[in-house]
Image (cartoon, rainbow, N blue to C red):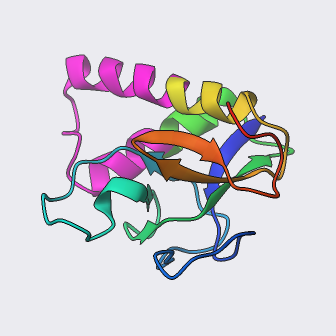
Amino acid sequence: MKVLVASSSAPGRTDDDFSWTVDGELVCIGLPCCTCPGCGCTWSVAGLASSKATSMFKVFNHPTMTKEEYLVAFQDGLTRQGWLESGDSAAAKDMEVWAEEHLAVAASYPDGTDLQIVDGRVAARAGSGRSAG
């Protein structure tokens, strides 16, 4: 199953790129962080294990992870980070839809494609996979 994971290297790396995550950890797109101009929140994703940010992530075809395991990991990461309260069934359903959207993004790119956030959208990095998801 294809998932989105953190990466500390990517083709076309720029001075704006950063990675404080653990390579290979699952990531979450679009967590609201702050409104500081130029801080990187608008072009980064959050690691679900480390709770850190990276501007570089990729598609990884996980050889053993099931959809159910992915949903548990996604929910656990968001709960530990305070984005989802344990026992909130309505929020858990929203989280499941959000997790499914992540899986759809991953499925739309070839395995190993390096990705980035550009103008609020996921895009393949130049020199990696195809240019649009």
Q: Is residue 76 magenta?
A: yes
Q: Quadrant of the N terminus?
A: top right
Q: Residue at x 23, y 25 (%)?
A: 91
Q: Is residue 68 magenta?
A: no
Q: Is residue 72 left or right of residue 35?
A: right
In the image as oriented, which residue stretches furthest toward the left? 35
| Magenta span | 74-100
Residue name at image x 36 percent, y 44 percent = 30
- Give the main secondary structure, helix, strand or loop, of the magenta stretch: helix
Left-right relation of 80 to 65: left
> Where is residue 73 shown, x and y percent of the image?
51, 45
Is the C terminus in the top left, top right, bottom left or bottom right quadrant? top right
Is 133 displayed left or right of 29 in the figure?
A: right
Where 45 sits versus 2, above or below?
Answer: below
Q: Quadrant of residue 106?
A: top right
Near-viewer residue (11 or 69)? 11
Query: Where is residue 87 drawn, in percent x and y?
Result: 21, 30
Relative image position of residue 41 (x, y in whole percent): 30, 60
Counting the numbered discs, the total is 0
- Residue 42: x and y in percent read 32, 54
Give the quarter of the image for residue 119.
Answer: top left
Q: Is residue 49 above or below residue 64?
A: below
